[in-house]
Image (tube, rainbow, N blue to C red):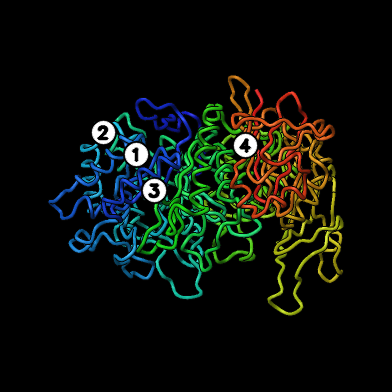
Amino acid sequence: MKQLGMHDSPSSRRPLRWPRPLAGSSERIWYGGDYSPEQWPEDVWDEDVALMKQAGVNLVSVAIFSWAKIQTTEDTWDFDWLDRIVNKLGEAGIAVDLASATASPPLWLTQKHPEILWRDERGDICWPGARQHWRPTSPIFREYALALCRKMAEHFRSNPYVVAWHVGNEYGCHNRFDYSDDAMHAFQEWCKFRYGNIQAVNEAWGTSFWSQQMSDFSEIIPPRFIGEGNFMNPGKLLDFKRFSSDALKEFFIAERDALASITPNRPLTTNFMVSATGFALNYDDWGSEVDFVSNDHYYLPGEAHLDELAYSASLVDGIARRRPWFLMEHSTGAVNWRPVNYANESGQLISDSLAHLAFGSNAICYFQWRQSRSGAEKFHTAMLPHAGRDTQIFRDVCELGKDLQLLSESGLTDTILHKSEVAVVFDYESEWASEHTATPTQRVRHRSEPLDWFRALLDNAVTADMVPIAADWESYRTVVLPCVYLLDERNTQRVHDYVEAGGKLVVTYYTGISDANDRVWLGGYPASISDVVGVSSEEFVPLGADHEGTLEHLDLSNGTVAQDLADRIARTADSTQILATYQAPEWTGMNEVPAITVHPYGSGKAAYVGCRLGRRGIAKSLPELFEVMDLDLGQLGAGASRIAEGDAAKVLRVERINQETGQRFDFVFNRSHESATVPIDGKLLLLSRAAAVNESAHAENDVNAASRSDAVSRSNTVSRANDMSLIQQSVTQDAVAQLAVPRSKVPQSVVLQPNGVAVSTVN
């Protein structure tokens, strides 16, 4: 079993195998969604296929939750209905991403073998009634699931319409942790493999604390219920999270290999759940086990909507190691599982999809094709909503299909995300460790800091790459380590080597606190890299207002404010430059304590930000910080210097590039609720909620109309904006969105309305 947290190499990951187009079809962006024909009478199927064709759908995922329909009893199999729909789709030119159908076991199986059901930390059984109620360590469940995989593979091995296997579904969404005896025995074996002997486990977990020493692996139990208000051994809990990710991964591998043994030439994937709040599994580790990375992403409502989507999509691209990836699920609007399920804003259906595309996805798919009439997800929106085809959602779905066709024909699938000069590092295990309930403050975890830095960089017109810690972040000019709580010896050495060689590193508070086993590095935080950053903190200073008279915040000399946590930096190297200090009453012990510093190390420089500044505080601090580090924000941000001051912070700019020909696709998104004007290079391909303005033509009142092959500006942009006057407020009548500007008239600009997008290409 592969150990987690290791720096990988290209040879440790499976080669990319991408779903091939159906015979007679050309390669294009995959477009579609989950399809559940078993929920509908067969007389609906023909209508579905016709409407899919109208929308430009060319792939659907089928049979994800169909086990009970396929294997109706232990000895009864029914593939007839599945054959009919797969063939109907294929004959219409719609490929099938066929599921292993193992996501939820049928009731006859759980009734016969209730021992396959997972147990919670109190030992209570998770009974059938929802989904994913199986335990990954059950040998009985594995036997039945692999039998189904083999049956599926044997039955569809020669079907020309099945282009990929969709193995399982969202592993760990509901069954991440299992505390059963099956899990206990598997956890014991996992520990044997990882540590070799029980004394090594004792050392890793620090079991001399609270008399927890073990003398045999049989004494290892899962972190079951220990009483309200008590604290689980941190090293044990961290390893159980690692084990749980590995246990599900090993189950996936077993399914994958069962399918591949019969259909070796068909690519396989499973859908991850990468987002700013999705940490159930170590998806970067899982990324090495799929033929192509797939992800399900559901937007964060509110002002962070686009930024969080971009952050997550960038992280998926990092997990895919900059190879094409597949957006398996997202939503056309409201979901069903939040306390309040907010609807999309006008234009977000188009904007969200193009944003995933901009960050390296070559497939745009939804949950789901037709909105369910019953069941727990009946209020989850779909490509074809309850109100039917005469709806704005379906019109947007059809327009998006045309856009994806145009981008495919223009060569987008031959490009990858253009590499940024700035990497923000993300680490699943640091998140898991920082989740422990006995920490300096429960308000600080790894998860929020990378997103704050990503957004703060966007506020300075820099689109960073989100890079998993095991990936090659050393190849970037500038690297941010945001609350990377765990730094093992390997990554500690990587930090030293990177800065020594000339790298520019930004390290935040709560980084490098502990080793891989959550044992604190001694000598003052962050002890393992304090020589690199040139500071040493002797104490955490949590900030809060839950008790009267406590220190709620700290003002910094640069005008920003620290919240939640600060470091009491007690020592700085002679060569350390202090950029900001705390301005606080003397009784706090924090007045004039360094807050932001820069230290030369080898041929590089390392900055240290010793407190939580939040997105806005980081954004305000970045210009001076980067200047002292000899970094030019204008050069780091693609095209940032050409964007009008005041509009730069409103815009997300992303590039994809063909590494052989140099062809570039520029995507520009409005991340605000105000209009933004941005320059555009090259040939304008697409506009959504936007208007193109040619500078010289505008002066002459001479704007040339172009065909859709030059630019696409959909008529339903008007309906989404409710009134064309929203656009005409920003540009004159001679520059409405339907008019495109020929290449000879550059430079040109685009006015983006809220949720507006422009796509151009430069050869």
Q: Residue furthest bottom?
A: 548
Q: Amino acid at mark 1?
A: Val
Label 4 – label 3 distance at C-alpha: 27 Å
Sequence order check: which comes first, mark 4 or mark 2?
2
Sequence order check: which comes first, mark 3 or mark 1?
3
Determine the secondary structure under disc 1. strand
The image quadrant of residue 669 is top right
Q: Quadrant of the C terminus?
A: top right
Q: Residue furthest left?
A: 75
Mark 1 Cα-neighbour bin, 10 Å: few <14, some 14–19, many ≥20:
many
Label 2 – label 1 distance at C-alpha: 10 Å
**What residue sits 80% from the left and 41% below the top?**
626
Locate residue 758 relative to residue 632 in the image: left or right. Answer: left
Residue occupied by mark 3: 34
Residue occupied by mark 1: 96
Label 1 – label 4 distance at C-alpha: 28 Å
Sequence order check: which comes first, mark 2 or mark 1?
1
Spot occupied by residue 249 in the image (x, y as percentages of width and height): 38, 46
Q: Amino acid at mark 2?
A: Asn
Sequence order check: which comes first, mark 4 or mark 3?
3
Mark 2 Cα-neighbour bin, 10 Å: few <14, some 14–19, many ≥20:
some
Q: Amino acid at mark 4?
A: Leu
Residue occupied by mark 4: 686
Determine the secondary structure under disc 4. strand
The image quadrant of residue 629 is top right
Residue occupied by mark 2: 159
Determine the secondary structure under disc 3. strand
